[in-house]
Image (cartoon, helix red, strand yellow):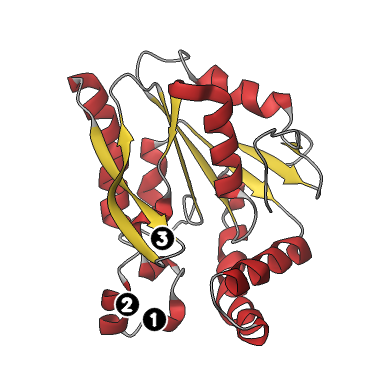
Amino acid sequence: MSGDDTDEWLADEVVCAAHALIGARDRRALLGIVGAPGAGKSTLAAALVRQLGCTAVNVPMDGFHLANSQLERLGLADRKGAPETFDADGYHALLARTRAACERGSTIYAPDFSRTLDEPVAGAVAIAPTTPLVITEGNYLLLDDPPWCELCECLDAVWYIDAPTHVREQGLVARHVHFGREPAEAWTWVATNDRPNARRIESSTRRADRRLVWDGTSMRFDDTAA
């Protein structure tokens, strides 16, 4: 999924719901956005930050990818993107720190992920103490397995994005090709890596507070979802 700066694809109700988290409590709010690979998590987070301006910042889970050198050392290079290829404890600690730092009035710095480098970049995201909403998006915010299951302790709400499989996978292939893979290699990576990860993510969606649907033209809440 790809968005644009006009954000016409994003329903107003979604922006309003994110804005409602600000000031709904006497502390900084943390909103989690979860979904399978290619569902549009980073696109939604970026759109919300644009719409909410200086009141929100995005801290992506992808900043906690293990470095490629560590994946090679651990024999996990061909599993990059699976839960075991992230520093989950570091991610949990960073989310917990965002509350304490706000109370202390200090800025903290979070890592981001560069698709060009295919590596995490330390200290790339500044979280000012005056920013009332931290949005964090990633694949595994709702997994039952430790230490992932502890993440919800840090989050005030988690929204799950439901997108059609064929739309997600076509977008993933296009992304992989854009960053250097041959089309056949990209489809193989989707089938052997992204697809199994998606099934694992989808098995944990019952824990989401709200469900968003992407139909190819718009993203909105599905209030009929169980």
Q: Identify the residue at image location x=29%, y=33%.
A: 98
Please identify, in this view, whether the residue under mark 3 or under mark 1 is nearer the observer: 1
* Mark 3: secondary structure: loop
Q: Identify the residue at image location x=45%, y=56%.
A: 144
Q: CA distance from mark 3 to mark 2?
A: 21 Å
Which image quadrant for residue 59? top left
Mark toward the start of the polypeptide (3 vs 2):
2
Q: CA distance from mark 2 to mark 1?
A: 5 Å
Q: Position of residue 151 (x, y in %)?
A: 38, 46
Q: Which mark is residue 77?
A: 1
Q: Compared with residue 199, is residue 210 higher up or lower down, i.e. above or below?
A: above
The residue carrying pointer 2 sits among few (fewer than 14), some (14 to 19) or many (20 or more) residues within 10 Å by Cα, namely some
The amino acid on which the numbered mark 2 sits, given as a three-letter code, is Leu
The amino acid on which the numbered mark 1 sits, given as a three-letter code, is Ala
213 left or right, relative to 69: right
Mark toward the start of the polypeptide (2 vs 1):
2
Mark toward the start of the polypeptide (3 vs 1):
1
Q: Position of residue 74 (x, y in %)?
A: 28, 81
Q: Which residue is mark 2?
A: 71
Find out whether the residues at labels 2 and 1 contact each other: C-beta distance under 8 Å: yes
Q: Which residue is mark 3?
A: 145
* Mark 2: secondary structure: helix
